[in-house]
Image (cartoon, rainbow, N blue to C red):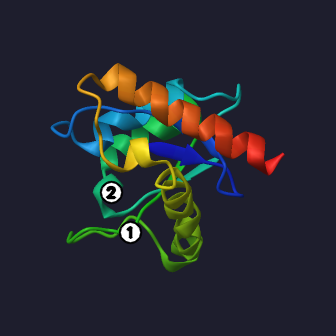
């Protein structure tokens, strides 16, 4: 899981096994942030449409979660907020940049800590290339 800024540069990354749901990893990723202030908005896909996550992010961090609704009766997002969802491609661009590193395309490391270290190294190289 990764959090980027408006230019697609990495702000926080987190690696975990495939079994936990992404909603449970949001707080862990925000705590691993390399900047001191939290973003004002997070844009995620349909997996992040959760009332509990919305309430927790708003109460603890002051973050507005923007995610399209899953199949539900009561809609929580209107069209104005979802216009920002079009900018989700910037996160996908970060993952495309990370796939330029052969070690990250296929997870050769058995331990998650080693894989996270290589992901962080890749993010550091991306940041150094941009500045």
Dots 2, 1 in contact, CB < 8 A: yes
- Density class for disc 1 (Cα within 10 Å; few <14, some 14-19, many ≥20) is many
Residue 115 tag number: none
Residue 104 visible in the picture: yes
- Asked where in the image residue 68 lies, by quadrant, the reply is bottom left
Q: Position of residue 89 (x, y in %)?
A: 54, 69
Asked if 74 appears above or below 127 in the picture, the reply is below
Q: Position of residue 30 (x, y in %)?
A: 51, 32
Residue at left 76%, top 40%? 128
Q: Nearer the viewer, residue 25 or 114?
A: 114
Residue 68 tag number: 1
Asked if 84 appears above or below 79 in the picture, the reply is above
Q: Nearer the viewer, residue 4 or 76?
A: 4
Q: Nearer the viewer, residue 52 or 23?
A: 23
Residue at left 61%, top 44%? 10
Residue at left 33%, top 57%? 49
Q: Residue furthest left?
A: 19
* Residue under pointer 2: 49
């Amino acid at each position: 899981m990764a959090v980027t800024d408006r230019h697609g540069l990495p702000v926080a990354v987190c690696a975990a096994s495939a079994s936990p749901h992404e909603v449970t990893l949001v707080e862990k990723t925000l705590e691993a942030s390399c900047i001191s202030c939290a973003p004002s908005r997070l844009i995620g896909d349909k997996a992040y449409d959760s009332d509990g996550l919305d309430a927790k992010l708003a109460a603890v961090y002051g973050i507005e979660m923007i995610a399209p609704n899953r199949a539900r009766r009561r809609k929580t997002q209107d069209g104005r907020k979802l216009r920002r969802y079009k900018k989700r491609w910037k996160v996908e661009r970060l993952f495309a940049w990370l796939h330029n590193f052969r070690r990250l395309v296929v997870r050769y490391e058995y331990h998650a800590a080693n894989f996270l270290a290589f992901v962080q190294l890749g993010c550091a190289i991306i940041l150094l290339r941009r500045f």
